[in-house]
Structures are given as C-alpha cells and as structure tokens.
Amino acid sequence: MYETVTVNIMVENVEETVEFYERKLGFQKVLSVPETGKNLNFAIVGKDHISIMFQKQDSLLEEYPSLQKESIVPTFTLFITVKDVRKLYDELKDHVTLAAPLHQTFYGKDEFAIFDNNGNILTIAC
C-alpha cells in the first residue's frame, strides 16, 4: 500500500536552502517552481535514495493555514543513514554547524548531527 515518504520542509528562502544542501551536503536540485530564476516557491533536492522537498513559507501556509505560527520553529529531526559516517563527518565538520559531534549512541550507532541553514537538525548515522 505505502510506497514512499518524503518530507516537505517549510522555509523562508528556498534558494538559500537548496544552495546549502547542494554545497554542504552534495545534493542536487531535481526540480523547482518556477524552473529557473529567483523567488522559488518550491524545490526538490536529491542524493542517492533521498529526496527532500522545500516550500516557501507563504506558499505552504496558503495550502495549510493551520501551520501558521509567529515564526518557523523546527520541530523534528531528519535521520539519514550513510555508508561511511566517519568519512562524511571529517568532510563536513569544519563547514557546517554541529548539533552533536561524532559519537556512539546507546543503541550502538556511530552518528553526528548538524544544523541546516534553517535550524533543522539532520542526524547522520551509520
């Protein structure tokens, strides 16, 4: 019945968010609305088997008025698994803001966490 789940994250600036995911994490823009130019309302980035959608705040609030708040406040974390967490940590640690350094969890995973440009926490584990 269910096939996939993809997060759609509300952001103030889609272009800046796409740039962060491209430059810092190696994602590529898959599509955007509009297709080119400034003032993007929506974009999807992808890397390997991961897709993430970003939608501009006013556009998403028009769709779902119940999401209206004073400001965008992250209320979730994304958990991303990778093949070589230590290698990725070494590549990223000096170029992003860490939410948690590389460590081993109580459940035996090696993981670290970073903040994206919107304050969302991305936990990266192996």
Image: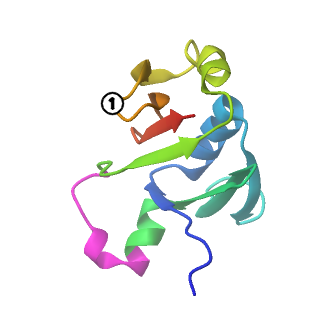
| Point 46% across, 22% down: residue | 97
Q: Looking at the image, which is closer to me, 96 or 111?
A: 111
Answer whether residue 117 is visible to the viewer in this image: no
Residue 68 included in the magenta stretch of the image = yes
Residue 63 horizontal/vertical position (percent): 43, 80
Residue 100, compared with residue 27, is above or below; it is above
- At which x and y percent is residue 79? 48, 46
* Residue at x-position 63% and y-position 40%: 21
Q: Residue 101's quadrant in the figure?
A: top left
Q: The magenta stretch spans which residues?
A: 62-72
Instruction: Label 1, secondary structure: give it.
Output: loop
Residue occupying image coordinates x 67% and y 19%: 87
Q: Which residue is under mark 1?
A: 106
Q: Amino acid at mark 1?
A: Phe
The answer to which image quadrant residue 98 occupies is top left
| Quadrant including the C terminus | top right
Q: Is residue 33 visible?
A: yes
Frontmost residue, 70 versus 81: 81
Check the image and report above or below for 36 versus 107.
below
Q: Position of residue 94 (x, y in %)?
A: 57, 12
Residue 107 left/right relative to 25:
left
Quarter placement of the N terminus = bottom right
Looking at the image, which is closer to me, 116 or 72?
116
Does the segment drawn in magenta span residue 94?
Answer: no
- Using residue 42 as the reference point, say whether residue 114 is left or right of it: left
Q: Is residue 15 above or below residue 87?
A: below
Return the residue found at the far bottom.
Answer: 1
- Few, some or many C-alpha atoms within 10 Å of disc 1 (few <14, some 14-19, many ≥20)? few
Image quadrant where residue 105 sits: top left
Percent position of residue 66, x then y: 26, 76
